[in-house]
């Protein structure tokens, strides 16, 4: 029987970033079981789509999730990224501020 997951690597990356906005690509790669280059590509996809805004913080990056954006899935596009994150991630941090691109 093959292994599979309900969440794609892109969704898992988004949830990881929601849990830790100071996340390192190295840690994301380990979590996903992919190379750092693949993790970088996933974060780049999320950034290009507007779901994540990357901010330089010294030598590190800090990520901000755009919680107001709709899901990319046509079946549930009336729901936002923020609703999914709230459902699947329990953080003790205040909600991310909404930024308009």
Image (spheres, rainbow, N blue to C red):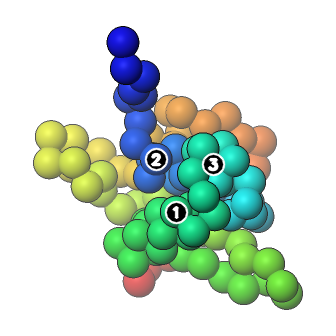
Q: Is residue 60 left or right of residue 66?
A: right
Quadrant of image for the N terminus: top left
Quadrant of image for the C terminus: bottom left
Q: In the image as oriented, which residue stretches furthest toward the right?
A: 58
Residue 16: image tag: 3
Name which of mark 1 and mark 3 comes first in the sequence.
Answer: 3
Q: Secondary structure at mark 3?
A: helix
Q: Is residue 40 left or right of residue 31?
A: left
Residue 64 lies in what quarter of the image? bottom right
Bin the neighbour count of mark 2 within 10 Å (Cα to Cα): few under 14, some 14-19, many 20 and up: some
The residue at which mark 1 appears reads as 38
CA separation, marks 2 and 1?
A: 10 Å
Q: Secondary structure at mark 1?
A: helix
Let me know if residue 19 appears in the view.
Answer: no
Q: Can you tell which of label 2 and label 1 is closer to the viewer?
A: 1
Let me know if residue 41 appears in the view.
Answer: yes
57 vs 23: above or below = below
* Closer to us: 39 or 17: 39
Q: Can you tell which of label 1 and label 3 is closer to the viewer?
A: 1
The residue at which mark 2 appears reads as 9
Bin the neighbour count of mark 1 within 10 Å (Cα to Cα): few under 14, some 14-19, many 20 and up: some
Name which of mark 2 and mark 3 comes first in the sequence.
Answer: 2
Q: Residue 7 placed where, x, y %?
A: 41, 36
Q: In the image as oriented, which residue stretches furthest toward the left?
A: 74
Q: Residue 70 placed where, x, y %?
A: 30, 56
**Mark 2 vs 1: CB contact within 8 A:** yes
Identity of the residue drawn at 52% across and 44% down: 12
């Amino acid at each position: 029987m093959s292994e599979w997951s309900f969440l794609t690597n892109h969704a898992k990356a988004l949830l990881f970033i929601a849990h830790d906005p100071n996340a390192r690509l190295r840690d994301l790669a380990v979590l996903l079981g992919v190379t750092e280059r693949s993790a970088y590509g996933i974060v780049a996809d999320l950034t290009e789509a507007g779901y994540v805004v990357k901010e330089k913080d010294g030598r590190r990056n800090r990520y901000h999730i755009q919680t107001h954006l709709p899901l990319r899935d046509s079946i549930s596009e009336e729901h936002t990224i923020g609703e999914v994150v709230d459902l699947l991630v329990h953080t003790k941090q205040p909600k991310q501020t909404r930024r308009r691109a």
